[in-house]
Amino acid sequence: MDYLLTEEQTMLQELALQVAQERIKPVRAELDEKEIFPRDLMREMAQADLFGVIIPEEYGGLGLGCLESCLVLEAIGSACVGVGTTFAATFLGAYPYLLYGSEEQKNRYLPVLARGEQLAAFALTESQAGSDAGAIQTTAIRDGDSYVLNGTKQWITNAGEASIYTIIALTDRTKGPRGASAFIVEATDPGISFGKKEHKMGIRASATAEVILQDCRIPADRLIGKEGLGFIIALRTLDYARPGVGSLALGLAQGALEEAVLFARERQQFGQAIISFQAIQHMLANMATNLEAARALVYAVARYIDQKPREFSKEGAMAKLFPTDMAMQVTTDAVQVLGGHGYMREYPVEKMMRDAKILQIFEGTNQILRNIIGQALNKEYTKKR
Amino acid sequence: MKIIVCVKQVPETQDVRLDPVTHNLLREGVKSIINPFDLYALEEGLRIREQQGGTVTVLTMGPPQAEAALREALTYGADQGILLSDRAFAGADTWATAFTLAAAVRKLGGADVIFCGKQAIDGDTAQVGPELAAFLDIPQVAWARKLTFVGPERLQVERLLDHGYDLVEVQLPALITVVKEINEPRLPSFKAKLKAKAATIPVYSLSDLGLTENQVGLKGSFTRVVRVFPPPARGQREILQGAPEELAAALWGRLQQMHLR
């Protein structure tokens, strides 16, 4: 398919694919097996300017948009979603101050992220606040020129590896979700520490841990935007990030489809290559068709977001929901096409199937995303009447 | 620091075909790449620039399409590329090639350090680097696997040998040829790719270099390729097996039989 990419977009895509093929693919199995954090790969991706994609040029980035970031994430995801998640988590951490930060905050944090010198993380989830994000307990109490933060954030990607954390905490418990605010906490601030690294089913190259805040005192100018904007900032950040998760799913499914087709062409049973059987052909055909449909959706939504619409929660949710469900199906089918081989660790598809599952869970479970889409529809039709 | 890196565009395939009459490489239909060893030379040049400041100029001699190799070098972050191209340069042996490169280096006002790959994967002579140093009358260190600045203009170099390494020091300006062990070449960067696409690549011709036809190309070459052939298969071999003492005794017996003692 030709998605009418510009020459510049194609160049960026080729560069990201080169990183994926030459640097990530050869090491992905080992990173997964041994749960190695891909620090060297992050350095290489930084050197290739990939960390600068969404950061404006005045802060040392490339000043490109959502579609370009999707192209990069799709390419990286085609080699390893664990590495892709590590990479993408920095953008998730950066969107809050990129979108709502003061000039001082942007100048201080965006250039080091654009150069890939430091990684960022985004911390919203807590043990009692997953899909019900409004139930967070972490507090930030104003004390003179400081805020003092207390609470524990759970399952935070890049925790312990990132230098810059966006923390959503309650500044006013009485106001419920309207009492939440967003803060920037640095890894060197007093009172921040990290829990043990979690052992996960998939994306095992990525680091996931608790962020523990115990009387963590930070300067008051680390508040992003204003007090009370915490959830608006968090939800907007997720709106922007969701097509990126969808893109990781596109890459993952592409990688799985390629493994399945190549295997089916090679594998001989009943005296012929198994791709000659319709049972296999139809599976591959469904995989390819659903993948292409998902890609068309993600690119269309990304282009829409790049036009700066006022509201795009529904479209952002769709651009994560459909591709990640698709990737789960495609990777499962890839394992089926490879049969017993697919179930073995010598082949990459079992890892792809394990990696796919998280994409349906994080950054809004696919059930929550359906709620968002459903609520948006309800709202749209209320207006129309 | 003024850094020059010499690169050569070579056919990608290991399976080269030869013109049966001229014995030259048949390049048609074969994708061209930068000689792999030269990418390590370029990487080292870029690292020295990052460490010491300065500029990296990439130099190649070849047909007009060799410009692609220079543009590729720019995607890794080189500052400029210069192509030496003229019909008169065609058919050059290593002497005439180095002579032409030397004229270009002089035209550029010399360099503090010149990097080359240890050899090209097509000709495999490993001569052009050292010859270039000779024409420029600067010291050369071949097969470098590690460089360390020990003074503002002084480099300590580890030279990779078959059974270990030489540790030498060299005063700049100097020419260094590098082996693959010296570094891990970086990936291109997006910003450099954009710049490379728009870059103008100056072309130096015979007259630009102030040379005459007899000094360059086939006319300026002392050697002619008479025949190219694969090396003959190795003769009969025998592998001795056993404990070290038995092996020593067996080998000694065999040498005595061959009257080699």
Image (cartoon, coloured by chain):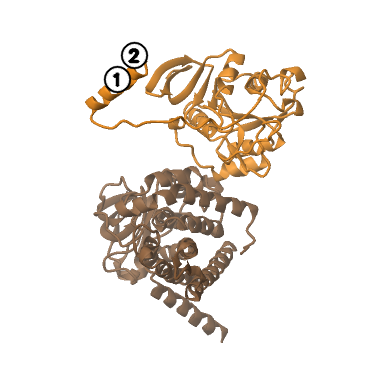
Residue sitting nearer the eye, B261 or B187 = B261
* Chain of the residue on which disc 1 is drawn: B
Residue sitting nearer the eye, B37 or A46 = B37
What hue does chain B carry in this figure?
A: orange
Q: What residue is shown at x 45% (from left), y 47% (from top)?
A: A23
Q: Residue furthest bottom?
A: A385
* Pointer 1 with pointer 2, Cβ within 8 A: yes
Residue receiving disc 2: B261
Above/below status of B155 relative to A242: above
Residue B170 appears left or right of B243: right
Residue sitting nearer the eye, B89 or B41 = B89
In the rendered structure, which disc, 1 or 2, sits on the residue that comes first in sequence? 1
- Disc 1 from disc 2: Cα separation: 8 Å
Above/below status of B260 relative to A27: above
**Element type at marker 2?**
loop
Residue receiving disc 1: B252
The amino acid sitting under disc 1 is: Trp
Residue sitting nearer the eye, B152 or A328 = A328
**Element type at marker 1?**
helix
Residue A302: x %, y % from top left: 55, 64
Residue B130: x %, y % from top left: 55, 19
What hue does chain A carry in this figure?
A: brown
Residue B14 appears left or right of A270: right
Q: What residue is shown at x 69% (from left), y 38% (from top)?
A: B65
Residue density around tag 1, few if under 14, some if 14–19, many if 20 or more, within 10 Å: some
Quarter of the image with the C terminus of chain B in it: top left
The amino acid sitting under disc 2 is: Arg
